[in-house]
Amino acid sequence: DAKTTQPNSMESNEEEPVHLPCNHSTISGTDYIHWYRQLPSQGPEYVIHGLTSNVNNRMASLAIAEDRKSSTLILHRATLRDAAVYYCILRDSTDSWGKLQFGAGTQVVVTP
Amino acid sequence: SQTIHQWPATLVQPVGSPLSLECTVEGTSNPNLYWYRQAAGRGLQLLFYSVGIGQISSEVPQNLSASRPQDRQFILSSKKLLLSDSGFYLCAWNGGTYWGEQFFGPGTRLTVL
C-alpha cells in the first residue's frame, strides 16, 4: 500500500482554522485519500475523502494538490471537541477487501 | 440504522490465559469485518479481515486468531496471551459505500499482566 507522511502534532487556538498536511508522493491513480479522526479512548471515525477535486462536508474540507502528491485537511473553526488524532490514509479503490492502513497520524491540540 | 457492538469493554488477563473478544454488527448483511489493534501511543494495526462466513485473512503473523461463525459476528481469540498482546482492540465494518468508509466499534481495552 502507498504510504502517507503527516506531522506528529499540531496546535491551534479555539475557533481558529487548522490546516493538517499530508504527503503521499507515491499515490496511484486508483487511490482515494481518506481522513479519519480518533478521539481519546474511542474508535476512529470517518471525516472525509477525495480523489482529485477538493471536497467539503459538515466536518471539514479537503484540499488536494493538482498532482495529488499531497493534501490538506482543513478544520474551519477548531473547537475543543476537535482535539484528536487525525489520520490520512490512501485507500486503493481496486482493493475489494476495503482494507485501511493507518499510520501514526497527527495529534491535534486545541487551546481555549 | 447500523450498529456495531464489542464486548467486553475492558479486560485484564494474566499471561498465558486464553482470550475471546466478540464483535457483532446489526442492521446490515454480508459486511466486510475487520479487527485492529492499537498499542499504547501507537496507530492502528490491521490484524484480520473477513468478507464472509468462515473467510478470514490475516495481515500479520501473531499470537491471535479470528473466526466468523455467523454473517454479522466476528471473534478474536488467543490460546495463550502474551504481555505484548495488551492494547486497544477495535472491530470495524465497511459501510457499503463505494469509497469504503469504515465504521468502528467502541473497542476493548485489554491489559495482560
Image (tube, coloured by chain):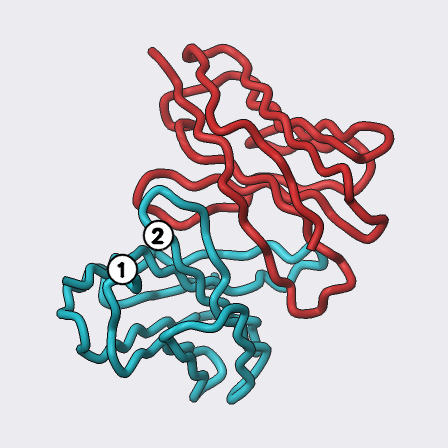
Chain colours: A red, B cyan
Would residue A10 appear left or right of B16 to someone viewing this image?
A: right
Q: Position of residue A90 (x, y in %)?
A: 68, 48
On screen, residue A62 versus residue A29, left or right, reads left
The residue depicted at 49 percent of the width and 41 percent of the height is A104
Chain assignment, label 2:
B
Q: Are marks 2 and 1 in contact (CB under 8 Å)?
A: yes
Q: Quadrant of residue B105?
A: bottom left
**Split into 4 quadrants, where in the image is the C terminus of chain A?**
top left
Callout 2 amino acid: Ala
B96, B21: nearer the viewer: B21
How dense is the environment of label 1, judged by Cα within 10 Å: few (below 14), some, or many (20 and up)? many
The percent position of residue B1, horizontal first and vertical second, equals 47, 61
Q: Is residue A107 above or below residue B84?
A: above
Query: Residue sitting at 51 percent across and 70 percent down?
Result: B33
Pinpoint the chain carrying mark 1: B
Q: Is B66 on the left or on the right of B102, as rendered?
A: left
Name the amino acid type tagged 1. Answer: Ser
Front one among B47 and A98: B47
The disc label shown at residue B57, or none: none
Q: Which residue is mark 2?
A: B39
Residue occupied by mark 1? B86
Residue at the spot 45% in from the left edge and 52% down from the top edge:
B44
Q: CA distance from mark 2 to mark 1?
A: 7 Å
In the image, residue A14 lies at what x, y percent?
41, 12
